[in-house]
Each structure stands twice: as C-alpha cells, then as structure tokens.
Image (cartoon, helix red, strand yellow):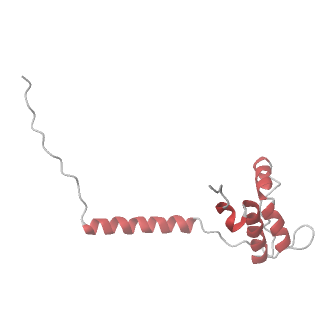
Amino acid sequence: MHPTQDVTSHRTARTSPRGRRVALAAALVLAALALAACAPGPNPDVGTPTADGSPAGFWLGLWQGIIVPVTFVISLFTDTVNIYEVHNNGNWYDFGFVLGLGLFVGGPFGASRGRRHS
C-alpha cells in the first residue's frame, strides 16, 4: 500500500483593493510615460527653404504621401532618401502627406471593401 499524502489546498494570493489601486496607478503612470516618450518634438526646419529655394507645401506633401511605400523601401538602403521632407511649410504639408498616404491605403473606407458573401 502506498502511503497517502495530506494534500493541503494552497490559497491564492489575493490583493487588497488598495493594492489593486496602487497597481492600476503605477500602470497608468508607466503608460503615460511611454506615450510621452513617443511624442514628437518641434521641427526646427519648418519654413526654411529647400535647395530650390522654397519649403515643401501641400502638393509636395500629397505626392510624397502617395509614394511613401516606394520611398520607404528605398530609404532602407540609402541615406540620401527620406520619406518625409523636413523643410516644409508646416500643417499644410502634413495634411497633404497624410491625405496622400490615406489615398494609397484606400482611404477611410478601404478596410470595409472586403468580400461580400451572397
């Protein structure tokens, strides 16, 4: 016969409501710090002219947003190509860039154009 072992139930450690609040507060602080670390800084080259004498505007931002997939691949292999023009006129360039990128990926309704089942 085998000797029987007394199996005691292990109590799971439960945290107190105060401990949960402290853990939640710590998680929120860490999340806020992580988001703050990702925030972009100011662009000191906004409004400064490019080599041709004028900063990039809306239309160049639109074009560069459309061609960003190709430009990104090229920028991986060369240091002379960037996907974003830092010598721009500010918000209008940014708007054009995001609009052009949106046109490439299908716009706001691109994801909803899936297969329709009859």
Residue 103 placed where, x, y %? 76, 65
Q: Is residue 21 left or right of residue 107?
A: left
Q: In this view, does 5 lie above or below 45?
A: above
Q: How many labels does the image show?
A: 0
Q: Which part of the image, by quadrant, shows the C terminus?
A: bottom right
Residue 96 location (% of width, % of height) = 78, 71
Name the quadrant of the N terminus. top left
Q: Which residue is drawn at 45% across and 64% down?
A: 30
Report which quarter residue 93 is drawn in. Answer: bottom right
Q: Would residue 94 be found to the left or right of residue 52 on screen?
A: left
Residue 117 locus on image (x, y percent): 62, 55
- Residue nearer the viewer, 101 or 73: 101
When the figure is inspected, residue 84 is found, relative to residue 73, above or below; the finding is below
Quarter occupied by residue 20: bottom left
Looking at the image, which residue sits at the far top?
1
Q: Left or right: where does residue 66 sit relative to residue 6? A: right
The residue shown at (92%, 72%) is 53
Q: Is residue 42 left or right of residue 14?
A: right
Say which of 107 and 23 sits in front. Answer: 107
Residue at 65% in and 61% down = 111
Q: Residue furthest right?
A: 52
Which residue in the rendered view is the most extreme toward the front?
118
Quarter of the view holding residue 5: top left
Q: State the image coordinates of residue 90 (x, y, percent, origin top left).
A: 76, 76
Evaluate whether residue 113 shows in this view. Answer: yes
In this rendering, does residue 57 appear at all? Answer: no
